[in-house]
Image (tube, rainbow, N blue to C red):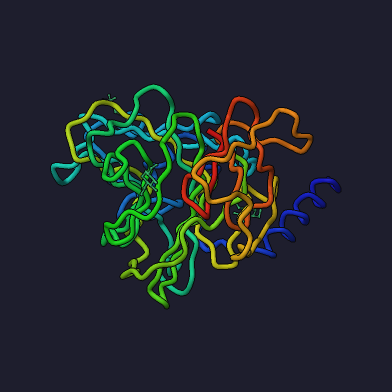
Amino acid sequence: MALLTWVTLGLYTLSCKAGTTIWSGSFNAYPTVSAFDLWSWGNEVGEYQWYIHGTQNTSHYLALGPSYKNPADTSETNGLKLTVDATSTWNSQFERTELIPQTTQNLGTGNLFYHFTISHPSTNLPDSTIEHQICFFESHFTELKYGVAPNATYLTWMVQEVPYWGMPFTPGVFFNIAYDIDFSAQTVGLWASTGSNPLVKVVQNVPASASTNSEDWHLGVLRLVNGGTEDWYFSGVYIETGPITTSVGNGTGGSTTTTPASSSTSVSSSTTTSSTTTTATGPTQTHYGQCGGTGYTGPTVCQSPYTCTSISPPYYYQCL
Ligand SMILES: *[C@@H]1O[C@H](CO)[C@@H](O)[C@H](O)[C@H]1NC(C)=O
Ligand SMILES: *[C@@H]1O[C@H](CO)[C@@H](O)[C@H](O)[C@H]1NC(C)=O
Ligand SMILES: *[C@@H]1O[C@H](CO)[C@@H](O)[C@H](O)[C@H]1NC(C)=O
């Protein structure tokens, strides 16, 4: 009991250094997927509104399980598997499976960070020939997309329909994302990392018509249209005030808050570095891990046979 108290206090202290969570979408609140059905317009309970889905039962579109979450995130027991298929038509010609925050908090004021982790397995792959809109606001001032120009096989971050950042949407890789939305200044930037790496600011804030009525952020996928069965994984969903929590999960692995050092870039701006010598004595980064970029302080040498590759210079380099 004493140990538990100390652990709890430790986490509390850590979380105090970062922002305050104003809405949590942790799936710990959902012991089974049938709990999503407790919400209705007449009974607005729980963390999520659940109404944007196709004709089948909830268990057809949602499943909970430990393999659906980022394994680095120890704060959550399960992640959510979300399925989009030919039955997923809702209120339109589009195919969609989406959750909406259920909260009385104002999710559209000041500078807020919208956190989530997204991944997909190597089965039921998303179709890169079809546009997908992911984790979007009704006005689409910022969102992720898949199956769009310039890189159809990338997970692409957009502001006002303009692509600013993307990474190959490789199966099995957990992409940690935070939209950095300044509703006062009307700008939005992006923080991102993979696996257990702390979030790094990969795109500085750019102008956007940022607004939300606090119930129009769609955690999920809208597809245009007529594709096969696709599975998407989500975890680590929460919205906080600044300063941003850069660690994944609850204070494990990585610094709690960092301000990117605008002057330090750990990797040269050549498209691919050749520093993959096996004689390196320092720590090496694993496949898909980050190996450089503004503010990054971790290993810059990749494990053999991977090469530190420029993904979004000068902000992000990855072992591929
Ligand atoms: C949906 O759930 C209801 C009630 O549990 C059940 O009677 C029905 O068979 C289910 N439908 C499908 C398509 O699974
Ligand atoms: C598209 O891919 C190219 C080549 O990898 C890359 O330089 C560019 O940043 C990518 N753009 C986006 C928005 O993903
Ligand atoms: C971290 O822990 C605090 C306190 O237990 C909790 O309120 C918060 O939602 C947690 N954050 C995440 C991302 O799980």
In the rendered image, the residue lying farthest to the bottom is 184
Q: Is residue 191 left or right of residue 292?
A: left
Classify the position of the N terminus by image quarter. Answer: top right
On the image, the x and y values in percent for residue 244 come to 58, 62
Kindly indicate the quadrant of the structure image that contains residue 109. bottom left
Q: Is residue 99 left or right of residue 77?
A: left
In the rendered image, the residue lying farthest to the right is 2
- Residue in view at x 28 percent, y 26 percent: 229
- Residue in view at x 18 percent, y 42 percent: 94
In the rendered image, the residue lying farthest to the left is 93
Residue situated in front as seen by the camera: 131 or 315: 315
Camera sees residue 121 = yes
On the image, the x and y values in percent for residue 307 come to 57, 33
On the image, the x and y values in percent for residue 220 come to 35, 44
- Is 264 above or below relative to 224? below
- Residue in view at x 61 percent, y 65 percent: 263
- Residue in view at x 61 percent, y 43 percent: 291
On the image, the x and y values in percent for residue 125 come to 34, 27
Q: Is residue 136 left or right of residue 280?
A: left
Q: Is residue 187 left or right of residue 9?
A: left
Kindly indicate the quadrant of the structure image that contains residue 226. top left
Camera sees residue 26 = no
- Is 135 above or below relative to 65? below
Q: What number of labels is visible?
A: 0
